[in-house]
Image: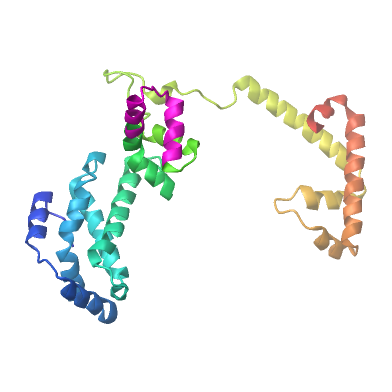
Amino acid sequence: MALDGYNDQTMSRQAMRAELLDAETELKLAYAWRDQRDERALHRLITAYMRLAISMASKFRRYGAPMPDLIQEASLGLMKAADKFDPDRGVRFSTYAVWWIKASIQDYVMRNWSMVRTGSTSSQKALFFNLRRVQAKLEREASQRGETLDQFQLRQLVATEVGVPLADVEMMEGRLSGSDFSLNATQSSDEDGREWIDALEDESAGAAEQVELSHDSERLREWLVTAMQALKPRERFIVAQRKLRDDPRTLESLGEELGLSKERVRQLEAAAFAKMRRTLENQSREVQHFLL
């Protein structure tokens, strides 16, 4: 059902004028779609239950999504339900469709609540749509007992009530605490005010740190070159192939090329590393800082 150009009042009026299906007619339409892929039967079935989809969509208006978008998602859920409905199970289509409609609307609300993904698991959905209600219920019950809950106690009780980890409750509270805020927004009403992104700390290395890192890297490279030169050609080849390539070679492949067993290549590699370490330790005591 295309919704472009329609407002929610128009769609509601059209849905209310749709026919009410009895169980026998509903069953015939479901069989016609499932067995014969009769699109007219599908359209009639969906049209008859659009009032259900619109009614469920209206319950999610408090999450700030436009009503036409909610109805669109509800109708998509209704169509999925019609496509997957099995009339042989003896269940009314409306009972089956409720789950699909609700799931479709909830997925849409959570996708559009924040640029940061709010959650997709069943426990996260339960928290998203029930957190405030459960918190209010627990606080009301505590008040009736003459108790006052601090935030930590309340979170623990919510986690137990909903059956989710405490960390999930803390995460969802943060998600629901406020809407997205642009880092490019100014810090004051003045158009020339500084943007919030300008207040973020620059985590990149400073000039002095960059020079120090460059110097240390050059010294380390010199030490490694000296250590490699102290190796025999076959040892240098093994170390280079095993440690200096983007895709290190296996002991087995090196053994096949060198005509050695895999175990022998491993022994040569270990001996080469031991020799390099001795060379480096003799070169300078400073290298021990890098070897720890």
Residue 21 appears at what percent x and percent y? 14, 69
* Secondary structure mostly seen in the magenta stretch: helix
Q: How is the image coloured?
A: rainbow
Magenta residue check for 163: no
Residue 160 appears at what percent x and percent y? 45, 39
Instruction: Return the residue nearer the eye: 56 or 157.
Output: 157
Q: Is residue 19 above or below residue 176?
A: below
Magenta residue check for 147: yes
Residue 271 appears at what percent x and percent y? 92, 47
Q: Is residue 195 above or below residue 274?
A: above
Instruction: Return the residue nearer the eye: 3 or 257.
Output: 3
Farthest residue toward the front? 145
- How many numbered badges does the structure rendering display? 0
Q: Quadrant of the N terminus?
A: bottom left
Q: Quadrant of the C terminus?
A: top right
Residue 237 appears at what percent x and percent y? 85, 52
Question: What residue sits 80% from the left and 62% below the top?
Answer: 253
Question: What residue sits 28% from the left and 77% below the top?
Answer: 34
Instruction: Return the residue nearer the eye: 105 or 289.
Output: 105
Magenta range: 137-161
Q: Is residue 241 left or right of residue 15?
A: right
Q: Would you say residue 191 is visible in this rendering?
A: yes
Instruction: Return the residue nearer the eye: 213 or 92.
Output: 92
Report which quarter residue 196 is drawn in.
top left
Farthest residue toward the bottom? 36
Q: Is residue 291 above or below residue 21?
A: above
Q: Would you say residue 39 is visible in this rendering?
A: no
Question: What residue sits 39% from the left and 41% below the top?
Answer: 127
Q: Is residue 285 above or below residue 166?
A: above
